Image: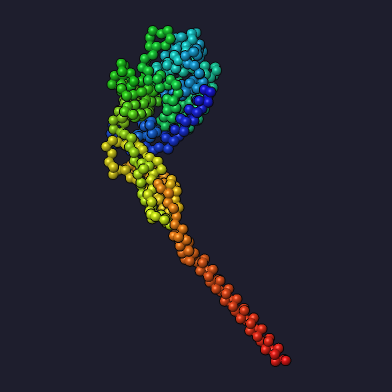
């Protein structure tokens, strides 16, 4: 039963993702701040509309953002986090020796058992590579390679076509890569899984038996240690840093009924101590939540244009309405002159028409950038006049060259027929005269 529920959830989420990120196009909004991150993607999560993107489809190294996928595989293969206990083995952690890996204290508990609940907190709160290895070994049934295969299979299932994982923690490997667009799909899916949102929004956590806490690497959500990075509306999600990846972060911002996900990657990782990715994420979330709003550009009860109707019993024109509402994210101070609706409909259409019939399309533009194309439909049924239609058919027949060709052919046949009849009559008459003379 649980498996069936997971399949249903996955299908629903995947459908949402495919209909949002893959089909939506970003608009050139007026963000005038400077960005330290090389790759940026800011998406309105309510609509799936990207409101700012910079090299979002460029392949990059994800560093510890990898651990989001690690959690997904664990969550889909371990039913009971609290009561599943894993014995910590030294041979599982040994591959991390000499790598300068971030650890979370799991390496200090060799020979002991830890719950999966504690291990996923070590994985996501303090970004422990040791926790990633232990979880991967357990779920992979002794094979971390098998666990990585599961990660790549899940990436394909989420339609992440530019993603490939080599390990469960994110340490650099040239073949370990993804894009901001793919990370949006992965993180969005993870947020639908039990526990993920709560864990990634935890600033301090105590594992069972510990008297020292795990502390988050994400300063945007840590009011005590975050300093100038802290942002009260930030929620989660994950940080990542390596020399090759630079500073990276995925976070969300939620306020006043709006939710945004911000992905920043490739900010400088140097001796300055400045985390440009966190600065960018904080500024972008603040800008989006303060300056942007959901705007209804077309409504299904407001006509876009009218069209001539042939053979109607009443009106010679009918109004066309959008089949659905068209909403998008725009600046709160946008100029209505920047919004254009361009209908694409025929010059006229023939009755009868049924309510809801599609007779054309309309494309909405903002600053000459396409927002969406929507079907235009007839709001009311229109009946056809039999007399008007019959007259049209008659006129069409009479004006057709085929009709006149048929008339000419028929006339020619009549003339030939008359000529033949006349000739036969003349011939018969001569025979009668000749017979009479013989008598």
Residue 69 visible to an observer of this rendering: yes
In the displayed structure, 189 sits above or below 424; it is above
Residue 371 visible to an observer of this rendering: no
Q: Residue furthest right?
A: 439
In the displayed structure, 395 sits above or below 378; it is below
**Residue 140 vs residue 363, the one in the foreground:** 363
**Residue 274 vs residue 379, the one in the foreground:** 379
Dividing the picture into quadrants, the one containing residue 254 is: top left
Counting from the top left corner in percent of width and height, residue 202 is at 37, 18
Counting from the top left corner in percent of width and height, residue 220 is at 33, 22
Counting from the top left corner in percent of width and height, residue 49 is at 38, 35
Report the label total: 0
Instruction: Write the residue at 67% across / 89% down.
Output: 433
Instruction: Write the residue at 58% across / 73% down.
Output: 413
The colour scheme applied to this rendered structure is rainbow
**Residue 121 vs residue 48, the one in the foreground:** 48
Looking at the image, residue 438 sits to the left or right of residue 240; the answer is: right
**Residue 191 vs residue 41, the one in the foreground:** 191
Dividing the picture into quadrants, the one containing residue 279 is: top left
Quarter of the image that includes the C terminus: bottom right
Instruction: Write the residue at 35% across / 42% down.
Output: 298
In the displayed structure, 162 sits above or below 318; it is above
Counting from the top left corner in percent of width and height, residue 240 is at 39, 22
In the displayed structure, 14 sits above or below 434; it is above
Instruction: Write the residue at 28% across / 32% down.
Output: 291
């Amino acid at each position: 039963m649980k498996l069936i529920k997971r399949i249903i959830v996955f299908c629903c989420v995947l459908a949402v993702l495919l209909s949002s990120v893959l089909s939506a196009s970003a608009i050139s909004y007026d963000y005038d701040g400077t960005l330290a991150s090389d790759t940026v993607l800011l998406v309105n999560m309510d609509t799936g509309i990207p409101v700012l993107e910079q090299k979002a489809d460029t392949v990059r190294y994800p560093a510890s953002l990898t651990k989001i996928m690690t959690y997904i595989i664990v969550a889909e293969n371990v039913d009971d986090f609290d009561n599943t206990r894993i014995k910590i083995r030294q041979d599982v952690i040994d591959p991390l020796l000499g790598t300068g890996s971030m650890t979370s204290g799991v390496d200090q508990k060799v020979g002991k058992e830890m719950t999966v609940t504690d291990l996923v907190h070590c994985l996501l709160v303090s970004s422990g590579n040791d926790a990633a290895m232990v979880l991967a070994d357990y779920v992979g049934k002794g094979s971390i390679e098998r666990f990585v295969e599961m990660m790549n299979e899940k990436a394909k299932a989420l339609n992440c076509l530019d993603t490939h994982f080599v390990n469960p923690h994110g340490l650099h490997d040239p073949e370990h890569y993804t894009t901001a667009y793919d990370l949006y799909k992965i993180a969005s899916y993870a947020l639908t899984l039990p526990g993920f949102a709560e864990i990634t929004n935890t600033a301090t956590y105590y594992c069972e038996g510990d008297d020292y806490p795990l502390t988050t690497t994400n300063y945007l959500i840590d009011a005590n240690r975050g300093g100038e990075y802290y942002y009260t509306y930030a929620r989660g999600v994950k940080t990542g840093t390596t020399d090759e990846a630079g500073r990276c972060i995925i976070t969300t911002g939620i306020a006043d009924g709006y939710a945004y996900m911000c992905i920043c990657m490739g900010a400088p990782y140097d001796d300055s101590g400045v985390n440009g990715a966190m600065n960018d994420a904080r500024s972008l979330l603040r800008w989006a939540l303060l300056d942007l709003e959901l705007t209804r550009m077309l409504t299904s009860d407001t006509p876009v244009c009218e069209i001539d109707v042939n053979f109607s019993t009443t009106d010679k024109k009918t109004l066309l309405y959008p089949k659905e509402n068209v909403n998008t994210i725009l600046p709160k101070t946008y100029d209505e002159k920047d919004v254009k609706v361009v209908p694409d409909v025929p010059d006229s259409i023939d009755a009868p028409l049924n309510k809801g019939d599609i007779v054309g399309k309309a494309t909405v533009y903002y600053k000459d950038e396409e927002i969406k194309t929507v079907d235009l439909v007839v709001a009311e049924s229109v009946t056809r006049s039999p007399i008007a239609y019959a007259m049209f058919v008659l006129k069409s027949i009479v004006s057709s060259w085929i009709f006149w060709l048929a008339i000419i052919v028929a006339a020619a046949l009549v003339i030939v027929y008359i000529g033949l009849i006349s000739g036969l009559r003349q011939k018969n008459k001569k025979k009668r005269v000749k017979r009479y003379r013989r008598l």
